[in-house]
């Protein structure tokens, strides 16, 4: 089992930045690939970014490419999402997720393949 706890959400003005953290604990703390997803009110949960087990490979959703950066520190069992140039349409609950990967470079955008989820953290961007 892997337990995930997100932090770092909050209220920010458009154009601002936030850094989300996802702390993992449990038996497979560093042996997992991770991703960030988000869900706005009345919308389905959508893919934001993913990172491979070693951090050597990353992938981003089109709407955040060039503005968000996913990274990880396996020594701290933590995955980060640096969000810059935030827009009102980035407002959502952000969820961290983890999965046991097929390889050390595997990343996926499919939320159904993730085994573990955090409770979510609210990000609100005002215009």
Image (cartoon, rainbow, N blue to C red):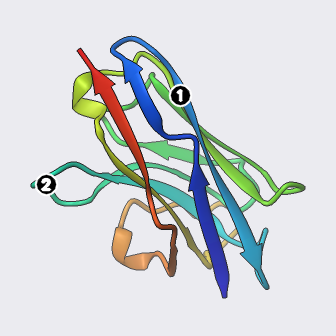
Quadrant hosting residue 27: bottom right
Image position of 37 with respect to 127: above or below: below
Quadrant housing the C terminus? top left
Residue at 39%, 11% (x, y): give it.
15
Q: Please provide percent x and percent y for residue 74.
A: 83, 56
Quadrant housing the N terminus? bottom right
Q: Please provide percent x and percent y for residue 92.
A: 30, 44
Which structural element holds mark 2?
loop
Which structural element holds mark 1?
strand
Q: Which residue is mark 1?
A: 18
Q: Which residue is mark 2?
A: 43
Q: Please provide percent x and percent y for residue 106.
A: 58, 64
Residue sticking out furthest to the left: 42
Residue at 26%, 59% (x, y): give it.
45
Residue at 57%, 55% (x, y): give it.
6
Quadrant hosting residue 102: bottom right
Residue at 65%, 60% (x, y): give it.
105
């Amino acid at each position: 089992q892997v337990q995930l706890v997100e932090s770092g959400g909050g209220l920010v003005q458009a154009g601002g930045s936030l850094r989300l953290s996802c702390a993992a604990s449990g038996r497979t703390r560093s042996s997992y690939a991770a991703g960030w997803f988000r869900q706005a009110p009345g919308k389905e949960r959508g893919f934001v970014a993913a990172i491979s087990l070693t951090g050597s490979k990353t992938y981003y959703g089109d709407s955040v490419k060039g503005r968000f950066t996913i990274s990880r520190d396996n020594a701290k069992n933590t995955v980060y999402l640096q969000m810059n140039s935030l827009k009102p349409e980035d407002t959502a609950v952000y969820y961290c997720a983890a999965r046991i990967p097929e390889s050390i470079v595997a990343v996926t955008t499919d939320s159904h393949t993730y085994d573990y989820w955090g409770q979510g953290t609210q990000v609100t961007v005002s215009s």
